[in-house]
Image (cartoon, rainbow, N blue to C red):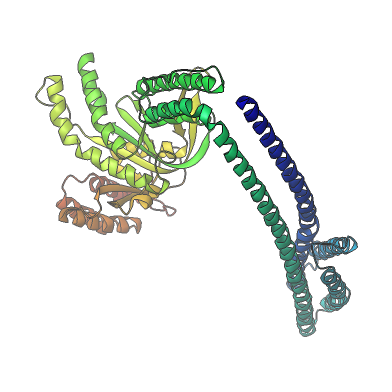
Amino acid sequence: MISLSIRRKIMGIAVVLIALMAVTALLSMASVIQVGGQLVELTQSYIPAYGNLARANIRSVERALELRRLIIEKLLSSSNDVTALRARFDAKGGEFDNEIEAARKLIGGLIEKNAASGDTRLLVRLQVRLDAAVDDSRRHLNDEISRLLNLLEEGNASTIDESLSRVDALRDELNSKLDGIRADMLVLLRADADLTAQRQRRVTLIAAFLTLLAAVLGLVFSLLVSAGVTRPVRRLLEGAKAVEAGNLDEQVPITSKDEIGHLTTAFNQMIEQLRLKERIRETFGKYIDPRIVEGLIDRPMLAVEGQRRVMTVLFCDVRGFTSTSEGMTPQGLVKVMNRYFSTMSAPIRDHEGIIDKYIGDAIMAYWGPPFTDDAAQARLASLAALKMLELVPQLRTELPELLGVRTLPTAFDLRIGIATGDVLVGSIGSEWMKNYTVMGDTVNLASRLEGANKEYGGRILVSEATMAGASDAVDAREIDRVAVLGQNQPQAVFEIMARKGELSPAQLKLRDRFSEGLSRYRRREWDESRRAFAAALAIVPDDGPSITFINRLDKFILRPPGENWDGSWRLEQK
């Protein structure tokens, strides 16, 4: 009996809810029809009419410009052949007439339909004003233009100026009338839009009331049936809390064969899938950044959709590693590489970067959405690069111990390049194997900047866009304007020297002298530039960029660049 009573209540609630949904649907349909009709008038009449009037103003101005071109050509040209200019002038007049006629038809159509959402009297008044403007002001303007063209044939400059002034006055009068008509048209358009919004709000209130009523009935229903489902639902809730806390080892017991029992079965299967996903994350997180793994699992569309975003890309390479690795045993090389990658990857991960891949002894990483805040990406990449350089002395002491030697065969140091700009982000590869990575000119630029350290004897070279985004966190100096291999346009390149406010007195003096030398270099003041760079070397004797410019200046003094030299330098190698 209780079961039947519950069933009947459920059926009654269902009937009421269906009736409410039907009423809501009917009201919504009626409102959609009304709003749809109003939107049709807005999109097919009001807005196009307003657009025609606006374009008529533009055509009037363009016609005036063509008239002035015709007059100038007629007065100044010896050929007196102004046929093409006259044709363009007449064409602009025709376009003006077409726009006005189109506006007339649209306003007339609204009047014939007795536009319920607008003010018919205002529309009639607009049409009368438009007819008067075109039939009166337009006629006077055309007559005066005809007189001006006749005077132009006679070549009397004074009378031409007077006639042109009258033409300008008549055109301004016509445009002023059209502006007033267009402004009133905009008032009608806004009033029509406000009426549409009011209707939408009214329907929203009705729908909200019906929804509230349905919610009350649903609450009554939940009170009726809660006694029979409270216990299994509570167990499911406890299981969900356990999953939320990270406990995936327990399953919820199945105590019934009804819908709650099926739900419990599905919940247990979900826990099993979560266990599998967790194992996948733990396994592949060692090969791919866990944030990418998590993103590809939770948002599969990341795997198939490429997106163009602004990202910051970093390339890091070991100076002289190729020659050093040739003398290592395979076991020693593996130890060195693992220690090097572990040490240098930590700053990247600590500063929210994504390690894209290891290429030989090089590291490629990137920053940007959705993994890094867009405004912080350049700053984080620059700070990570500085931290990587700080770890170089530690590696220099650890690597010989790993190899069982006293010192490394060559001086161990890093070269880092960073660039910020548009890249293509997505999964790249074949149908059997893909890699979630970034591609584009910005990636190539970062790689080229890493290689440019060889040219300038630097350690961290960054692009102008990177410097702009990281200027509040690091101190740097402009090194040169460089066109890297594969790019034609030169751009400023900067060397990051230290964190903001941490430059030593020697570094501050070095930056000032180097900046002076670079400025004089671009002004072709070779001797003064060389003295400034020499002063920079006196402060920091092993400053690579200063040495590079002194060597370059020695060549320029003997053989100066051409007159079209813009102060930039082209790198012909990677």
Say if residue 318 shows up in the picture.
no
Q: Which residue is at 35% across, 30% downward?
A: 245
Observer-nearest of 355 and 497: 355
**Residue at the front extreme, as displayed:** 1
Observer-nearest of 283 and 332: 283
Say if residue 20 shows up in the picture.
yes
Name the image quarter holding the C terminus: top left
Q: Is residue 104 above or below residue 22?
A: below
Observer-nearest of 461 and 430: 430
Q: Is residue 501 left or right of residue 140?
A: left
Name the image quarter holding the N terminus: top right
**Residue at the top extreme, as displayed:** 330
Q: Position of residue 298 (x, y in %)?
A: 47, 29
Q: Which residue is at 42% across, 36% downward?
A: 444
Q: Position of residue 505 (x, y in %)?
A: 16, 56
**Residue at the left extreme, as displayed:** 406
Q: How many marks?
A: 0
Q: Is residue 158 above or below residue 57?
A: below
Q: Is residue 14 left or right of residue 448?
A: right
Q: Is residue 388 left or right of residue 180?
A: left
Q: Position of residue 271 (x, y in %)?
A: 43, 21
Q: Is residue 284 above or below residue 372?
A: above
Place residue 242 in its image quadrant.
top left
Q: Which residue is at 84% across, 62% downward?
A: 115
Q: Position of residue 272 (x, y in %)?
A: 43, 18
Place residue 168 in its image quadrant.
bottom right
